[in-house]
Image: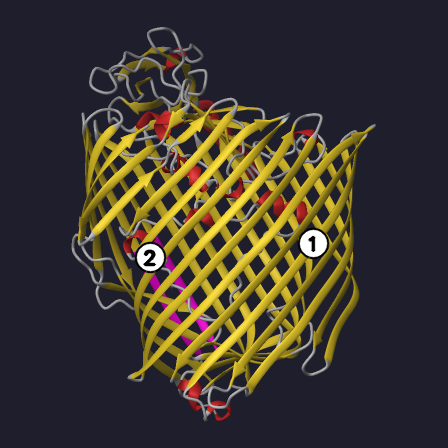
Amino acid sequence: MRNILLVFLFIYSFQSFSQSIKGTIKNEKGEPIIGASIIAYQLSTNTMLSYSISNENGYFDLSIKELQDSVKVTVRSLGFELSEKVIKLSDDGKEINFQLTPSDMILKELEVQSKPITEQGDTLNYNVESFAKEGDESISDVLQRMPGIEINDEGIISYQGRTINKFYVEGKDLMGSQYSITSKNLPQNAVASVEVLKDHQPIKMLADVVHSVDPAINIVLKEGVTVTGNAELGGGAPYIWFAKASPMVFNKKHQTVNVLSSSNSGQDELSTFSSINLFDFLEFGLIESKPTFLLGNTPQESSLFKKSEYNDHQTHSTSTNYLTGLGKGDLKINIDAYHDTRFQDLSSNTYYFIPNDTLAIHNLQKSTFTNKYLKTRLTYEHNSDENYFKNSFHFKVLDSKENSQFYQNEELIPQTSSKNFYNVGNKLTKVIKLGNSYYKMNVYAEYTNSPEQLNFKGGPLINLPSQNTLTSIQQETHQDHFKSYVGTHVIKQWKNLTFNTKLSLNYDWRQLTSTLPNTTEEDAILYKNDLNYMSFIPKISPSIDYRFKKLHFSLIPNLSMQLRSLQNHILSEKSEVNSIVFEPVSYISYDFLGVKLNGGYNFNNYFTELPQIYSGIIISNFNKANQQHIPILETKEHFFNGGFGYELIALSLNIYGNYEYKLTNKDWISSYVINEDGVAFMETQSFNENTGVHQKVKGNFDWFLLGLKTTLEGDFEVGQNEENVILNDVANRNTNKHLSWEVSIDFPIAKGLTFSSYYNEYISNNIYQDYNQVDWSQKIIGAELQFSKKRHLIKWINKWIDHTFLENQFLYVDFSYQYKFNKKTSVIVIGQNLLDHQYYNQTTMNVYQSNQTYFYLRPRQVMAKVRFGF
């Protein structure tokens, strides 16, 4: 009791010494200054005693824990002179006000600073000028610096870890899921602000009825901006060209975004053509089909370098997009096309971890990949508070060819492949309101045709007993796929509850045929497939959604009848699934003192489908073959996740974190057989209670310090995966653990001089067959120094890389210089890979092998280009 009393006396005495200084920070016009830093120092030692930042009203509150008679208080804010005062703490309770004078040295013309982030309801408004810096070209460059917003390599945008479901420009959705074409080409100086629409429901009729947890982005252009974009033309050595035009028009009746480019400079223009429409996935439970080719090689990509640093190519592409008002809605036309030829030279060491041994295979590869692509989309959408209708028709064609030469064990193996993809589909959504209820209908139908052919001569597969009479192999496959979906929703709201009952029918038909001819005997076939797969799934999903103040809870007890069949016409075999499946989905979130907590649980049943299942052998590469003879198999998955998000608007601070745990249970297992020549045969076998575990923790923070014009960012991820695999008839449990983290800073050193740097580290621990262990790590330190004065802009970019399997650490250096003739015309000189590094190593892992691949970098190059603004 005595000890407790002493603790209370100590706390009381400590609190009794606490003194406070309160006040406001204003400019000469009497307007509050947000984000000013206020620091209290001890007079005798100049030791910092307390620190605060002014809020949106210019108000601050300093708490002094140590007993002082007087303290020195300094106030700093970008664009204003430093202000100091000596404050007597005997005046406790009296407000101390500061009036800041504009600085003549920094931003002389600046009188009032705009708030970097403001909030209105569920909308955050980011002022672009607060986050932009000299040298930023597109709005994508600025978005990456805004707290809470992330952009991946494909241009997909997320907020607090959740992918956006819409990207608007002035409230219009012209681009759909390919919005990165706009974000990577829309000049940042044409944009006034970026709005983050939290919990955004894209259908206006359902905005207050069906709640969403996904964000959206709206781009607000500067007043008077209707025509914008750029045109660029350049060339350099060794034999480099670059040409690009991106005219854009935005007005009340029309929007158009056009991008035409031709280049061999390494710049990647094709990643913008590949994306997933999240909103369509949520509506239909499926997405537009993408190529799932079975045969041949595809270019390997790097995780250490940007694609522009190793991409050896010739690319011509165009994207034409137009939106206009039609009746009460909008008509949209989207056309994308490209012709891409890519060259890739690789050297690799592959280590197969087979029982009681490790097999090492060395390969050289020289490949040319050619892709021709065309996609058209015609969409009509009427989205108002009283009516919603949308119909979208699309057509896609891809012609892909490979011409490769492989060298394995000093043997030359030429290989070619030809793959085609044809896809046509239509989506329709309609919402009506009758009385107090809403009725929504979704209809989707799509057909895909995909023929392929693979040819190679020589190689280890020729030596197998089943092929020992062959000198070359010609594998052919053909896939046909038709899928359709019809769903209807009955939506009714009662007080804080929303009842959304969905009834749906999903029909899927697939056919896979394959032939492996005997090239030494006319009309002889070694292996052949002729399979039909059909699924018919009626489903009911009566969801309940509850919202009350800061609490949000939803539950969807999905119940479906799974009717699936696989018909093997050659073997006269049939596999069927007839079962009732219960797949609940739940979500809960709660806003506690500004921190949004969320969690969820999903249970899913997955069934193998074509082309995962077939009989006989399909040879996919000169050293890889898949051998199957299995029925329809099932995977059960439990998925738990929880997270939090916190945004402090006054300080431009955004923090979020997430934890995921996934438990899978399969009645099958992948079995691999590796022979002494490195030939990998993959087969799927029945296996009871095959469990796998995946768990991951990740976190992120972004902080923009307005007073210092400094951005601080950091993120980390810790993960572990466990799975069973059979390798050369021995069952094993393999484990992968990884840790990755990154921190970065971007700040001005002086007027016109800025410095940015990042540190990234990835650590991987891999255990095979309980005794083979492979550990590796990579570290990257990047730094950029930028100097701008009047019409000149200089950038010096360094990247230092250290990798476990690299013999030497190395430094990658780029340089650029820009001269502006006026606001719309400039010339740019770019030097890339100035130290002329030839190649680098990248390590990848899977369940039975470690692969060290040596990529060839683009050689040292210098290019000059002229840019014109529209």
User: As displayed, is residue 516 above or below residue 438?
Assistant: below
Residue 575, image x, y percentages: 73, 75
- Residue at image coords 63%, 25%: 327
The secondary structure type at the circle numbered 2 is loop
* Prevailing secondary structure class for the magenta stretch in the rendered image: strand
Q: Which mark is residue 394?
A: none
520 in magenta: no
Q: Is residue 242 left or right of residue 586?
A: left
Mark 1 or mark 2, earlier in chain: 2
> Dots 1 and 2: beta carbons under 8 Å?
no
Tell me the residue that label 2 is attached to: 304
Q: Is residue 817 left or right of residue 71?
A: left
Q: Is residue 482 left or right of residue 100?
A: right
* The C terminus lies in quadrant: top left
Name the kind of residue labelled 1 in the image.
Ser
User: As displayed, is residue 553 above or below residue 774?
Assistant: above
- Residue at image coords 32%, 29%: 709
Residue 185, image x, y percentages: 38, 37
The secondary structure type at the circle numbered 1 is strand
- Residue at image coords 69%, 63%: 509
Q: Which mark is residue 484?
A: 1
Locate residue 383: give its quadrant: top right
Camera-nearest label, 1 or 2:
1
User: As displayed, is residue 817 above or below residue 43?
Assistant: below
Residue 529, image x, y percentages: 61, 78
778 in magenta: yes
Specify start and end residues of the magenta stretch as a single range: 760-779
Q: Residue furthest front?
A: 522
